[in-house]
Amino acid sequence: MYTVSQISKITLEGREFFIKRDETIDPYLSGNKYRKLYILLQTPKNTFTKVISYGGTQSNAMLALAAICKSKKWEFVYYTKTISPIIKAQEYGNYYEALSLGMHIVELDNDLYKEYISGLRLNLDELTLLIDQGGADRRAKEGLEVLAEELRVQFKEEEFSNIKAIATPSGTGTTALYLALSLPEYTIYTIPCIGNVGYLKEQMQALHSIPKNLIILDPKKKYHFAKLYDEFFDIYEKLKESGVEFDLLYAPSMWLSLLENTRESVLYIHSGGLSGNRSMLERYKHKN
Ligand SMILES: *Cc1c(COP(=O)(O)O)cnc(C)c1O
């Protein structure tokens, strides 16, 4: 089913950038979720009967897991905090799509959530797999090595031979970390989109020590995840005019920071997330 995703070239604010089009891989498993969960796709059906995970109700990782579990005929149980009536009523978006793919949702009282989640791993049987929030899992390494190998081959082509650095925004930091470990000969830029630099480092270090070629940029301003910012919308529009649509949660901060902090030739890994744009664009419309 999968063939190597292409590299496109765009011009943004007079600068040339390259884009690895991982968002085109699959409508549910787009971008880095395909890479991070690659090993699960390679896992024989009879290895598990059930996958459990937890986190936000609009999560891209949740949707990706729902799609994998459907294709493998694994039960998928997802734990989350109380879900807002607005999200429950929507007939689009990640929550709606994941339910249509057969996800079982368990809503937990906000007070009990943390304790309940930490208890999950204590009660696992061998046919049940627990994937931590956002797909922050050591098994992500394999899929990012596949991406690294693909890039190495593509970078041998003349038109991509001057690429010096690679950029990918972080939630859990799993993607940036394993990409940096798999491509030590390149600089990897990332930026925290959930929490600050310190929090991102902690999450990465829970998986592996941080290699020297991974540069964590600090956003100019404190952005809160999933909040609306005029400069985010502006850069989203500019990118769209240049020919590629990006997500409105992670990509804007990374692009703003790349424009400000880098001069060399950069390749941006498009991590998908476009399934969340409809609801984000609705919110921007109401704001303006
Ligand atoms: C999940 C996601 C990220 C963050 O990936 P991590 O590996 O958790 O850092 C970035 N961009 C998009 C579009 C995503 O869906």
Image (cartoon, rainbow, N blue to C red):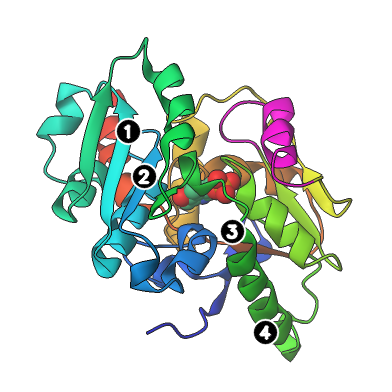
As measured in the structure, the alpha-carbon distance from the residue carrying label 1 to the one carrying label 4 is: 40 Å
Asked if the stretch drawn in magenta spans residue 83, the answer is no
> How far is disc 3 from disc 2 in space, using C-alphas?
15 Å
Q: Mark 4 points at which residue?
A: 154
Residue at x 56%, y 40% (from the top left corner)? 171
Q: Name the residue under label 3.
A: 139
The answer to whether the residue labelled 1 contacts the one labelled 2, judged by CB atoms less than 8 Å apart, is yes
Q: Which amino acid does label 4 sit on?
A: Gln
Closer to us: 260 or 140:
140
In this figure, which residue is indicated by the disc labeled 1? 79
Compared to residue 284, the image places residue 22 above or below, namely below
**Residue 57 in sight:** no
For the record, the magenta segment spans 192-208
Gap between marks 4 and 3 measured at Cα? 24 Å
Residue found 72% across the figure and 31% down from its top: 202
Q: In this view, does 211 lie above or below 114?
A: below
Question: Where does the image place residue 115, in percent across and percent down from the top left?
Answer: 45, 18
Q: Along the polypeptide, which appears first: circle 4 or circle 2?
A: 2
Which label's residue is closer to the chain start, 1 or 2?
A: 2
Q: Is mark 4 on a helix, strand or loop?
A: helix
Q: Name the side, left or right, on which 104 lies relative to 3.
A: left
Look at discs 4 and 2 and give the one toward the viewer: 2
Q: Which amino acid does label 2 sit on?
A: Ile
Q: Does the magenta stretch include residue 205?
A: yes
Q: Mark 2 points at which residue?
A: 52
Residue 216 falls left or right of residue 131 = right
Q: Which amino acid does label 1 sit on?
A: Tyr
